[in-house]
Image (cartoon, rainbow, N blue to C red):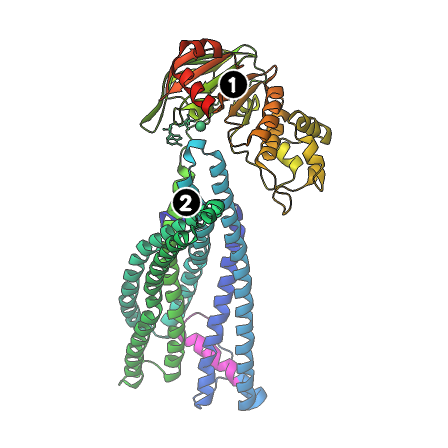
Amino acid sequence: MKNFLRIMRFGRPYRRYAVMNGVFNLLATVFHLASMLLFIPFLRLLLGQTKAVHEKPVLSWNKDALEQGFNWALTRLIELHGQIGALGIICGTVVAMFLLKNLFRYMAVRSICTFRNRIIRDVRSKIFDKMLELPLRYHNDERKGNLLSLITNDMQVLEYSVMYSIEMVFREPIAVIMFLGTMVTLSPELTLWSLLLLPISGLIISRISKSLKRRSTRVQEKSADLLGRVEETLTGMRVVKAFNGEDAMRRRFEQENDQLMRSSISMLNRQDVASPLSETLGTAVMAAIAFLGGTLVLGPDASLSGDSFLGFIIIFSQLLTPIKGFSQGYSGIVRGSSSAQRVFDLLETPNTVTEKPNARSVTAFTTNIEFKNVGFAYDDKPVLSNINLTVPKGKSVALVGTSGGGKTTLAGLLPRFFDVTEGSVTIDGNDLRDLRIKDLRALMGTVTQDSLLFNDSVASNIAFGRTGIGEAEIQRAAEIANAHEFISRMPNGYQTTIGDAGNRLSGGQKQRIAIARAVLGDPAILILDEATSALDTESEKLVQDALFKLMKDRTSLVIAHRLSTIQHCDEIIVLDRGQIIERGTHAQLYAAEGQYRKLCDLQAFA
Ligand code: ADP
Ligand code: MG
């Protein structure tokens, strides 16, 4: 219920739709009730029990006065149109009232539909914003499946259960109250009996909805697993096929698909039992009321007339529908509550990389970057320790070492993908944590191993994240990146969409587009993380050449697998298990015959 209220908070800006829904529903209920009450004079007429009333009675809300009013109107009708005519008019009125009821009902549904879809859109946007906001270290492959499932499955459950239920919870009570009021007017005694009998059936239904929530959580989990598997398979399709892995993937998928089916069936069975059960219970209650009412009609003091009793039964039978709707709505809320919980858990995940309110703006890089006694740990797994490093402006520093040594992590500290857990990183003497994050990142250009391009035009990919960039600027960047030539040969040049069939780009070409993207901002600081590692020798040359042009006059932090590419760097740092074990120029390190020399020798044979 708590989650339900929190979802409702998203509805505040759209509350007029909720109010409209309430008003229309109220009108619909009034007409529904009125049309049912018309059955009383209808029966009276049919059974020949109409008591003629020729004087217009005083109107007031009690049983006698209302009956008098009814009878008077009925008498007038019969006088004017004859018995058959009156019958026809009553039937016609019933139809008209139902028409109005359903018209208002439709308008109520329309407004609630707008209400809930707007809420869902806002929640979805919030989730996406949060995904973008959360620091890089939050995102890993395992969470990818969960996030995907959150924004698809959980949102759907939210929409169809919680949001669908909103209306039930707010609409049905109106109907219940009005129906009960009418019932009391007709026969207080019978109403009392009905009120005693109804909660018993309600209790049984509510027990069922309790176990629904647990099952629903399971369904969502299974469904996240399945999505994760599909995502993984699609991403790794090349490997799957290359290793004849289709059967293995299929087996795993089928296993998970099967589990999802089982938990869905289990949940739905539980959900579906509510309806037949409540119908049976409802009929039992109805029979009991019919019996009790019958004794009142047939009893010695005949405290209830037969036609009023029938009217009562008709309204009572309709009373069960909103009560059932209410309990279904409630179970929907319970069911959706586990999805809502997951959504709110995500929205409440704290962002660990935050900007101070008084963060300073930076626009230029003038002297140096310094790592002072830097230590870093993923959760409690230490990855870097005791890093002391200065990168003066205009110089290039290379990071080498075994994989898993912490090179990427060290480079990631600079744009604050993560924050140091010990020591500090400063830029021109300012702690990174005191600066505006956007400004800081704008100082840097990054090229990584897998050149990530988005499914958009080449030009948009180069200008990614920036607005108001002209063709000429994009082209200049592409030229520096040795990319202009092959881009111009593409069918639509810079407007060609990446990923269009027939425009398959090679790894080297993608990488050169990624380099153009890094060049475009004319960043003062370059971070190259294995930028050429995934390339064949020939494209490596082209890319390497582009990188050299890029590094000229810039400050750069270069991580390279191939040592030939970093020989000219001003300082080479050898990282091993998070510690700096050697540092110096290529010549110094080579002569020192340490770890670096070993790495060089290994590559010389390769
Ligand atoms: P390198 O780039 O030198 O190969 P990394 O900086 O990528 O090394 O990784 C250093 C260590 O940190 C590795 O042991 C790796 O398993 C661990 N690591 C990297 N990323 C994460 C992460 N997001 N969460 C937990 N551990 C991580
Ligand atoms: Mg790495």
Q: Residue at x 28, y 72 (%)?
A: 193
Which residue position holds label 2?
146
Q: Is residue 159 magenta?
A: no
Within 10 Å of disc 2 (Cα), the crowding (few <14, some 14-19, many 20+) is many
Three-letter code, disc 1: Ile
Q: Main secondary structure of the magenta part?
A: helix
Disc 1 C-beta below 8 A from ligand 1: no
Q: Nearer the viewer, residue 3 or 424?
A: 424
- In the displayed structure, would residue 395 be above or below residue 501? above
**Residue 388: % across, % down:** 41, 12
Q: Quarter for ligand 2?
A: top left
Residue 565 shown left or right of residue 194 in the figure: right
**Residue 150: % across, % down:** 43, 47
Compute the Cα span from label 2 to label 1.
Answer: 40 Å
Q: Secondary structure at mark 2?
A: helix
Three-letter code, disc 2: Asn
Q: Secondary structure at mark 1?
A: helix
- In the displayed structure, would residue 270 be above or below residue 535? below
Q: Which residues are magenta?
A: 58-75
- In the displayed structure, would residue 343 be above or below residue 577? below
Q: Nearer the viewer, residue 356 or 385?
A: 385
Q: Is residue 66 magenta?
A: yes
Residue 183 shown left or right of residue 129 in the figure: left
Within 10 Å of disc 1 (Cα), the crowding (few <14, some 14-19, many 20+) is many
Residue 566: mark? 1
Q: Which circle, 2 or 1, is nearer the viewer?
A: 1
Answer with mark 2 or mark 1, whichever residue precedes in sequence.
2
Q: Residue at x 40, y 37 (%)?
A: 348
Residue 356: mark? none
